[in-house]
Image (cartoon, grey):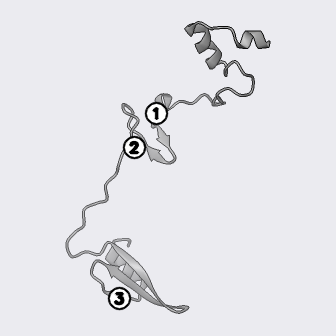
Amino acid sequence: MSIEQLFQPLSLGALLSELEKGGPHPGKGRQKNPDNVRLRDMEHPTVLGYELDRQTLTPILHPLPALVEGKDNGSDPIWEGDEFKGWRMVPSGDIVTDPKERDRRLGKE
């Protein structure tokens, strides 16, 4: 493409076709997806691991399950220096040293 062609006025249609091809400047145009996969063409669109709504392409939020009163839903490890002492259960605050008891309380049996 010559320098004269670069500075000629383009119609809107010609400009759009140039942009579709990657622009009037070779190598400096928009990078095209080699697989040509678009979000609107995906059955379950995802971006960076987040599932998107098909109509609005906004992230679908999955709320955490409601807490059950009187049941533990997590545990934090307890260390004294390099020595492992057990787990502090959340939200009860109980100290558990047996992994089977911890799993039972978390419902992972």
Say if mark 3 contacts mark 1, CB within 8 Å: no
Q: Amino acid at mark 1?
A: Glu
How far apart in space, not on screen, are marks 2 and 1 (Cα)? 15 Å
Residue tagged 3: 95
Q: Is residue 70 above or below residue 78?
A: above
Q: Nearer the viewer, residue 35 or 101?
A: 35
1 lies left or right of 57: right
At a point 57% along the width and 8% down the height, the residue shown is 13
At a point 48% along the width and 41% down the height, the residue shown is 46
Residue tagged 2: 59
27 lies left or right of 39: right
Element type at mark 1: loop
Q: Residue 95: x percent and y percent?
A: 35, 88
| Mark closer to the chain start, 2 or 1 | 1
Q: Is residue 55 above or below residue 73?
A: above
Q: Amino acid at mark 3?
A: Ile
Q: Is residue 9 above or below residue 68?
A: above
The nearer-to-camera label among 2 and 3 is 2
Q: Residues within 10 Å of mark 1 (few under 14, many from 20)?
A: few
- Say which quadrant the C terminus sits in: bottom left
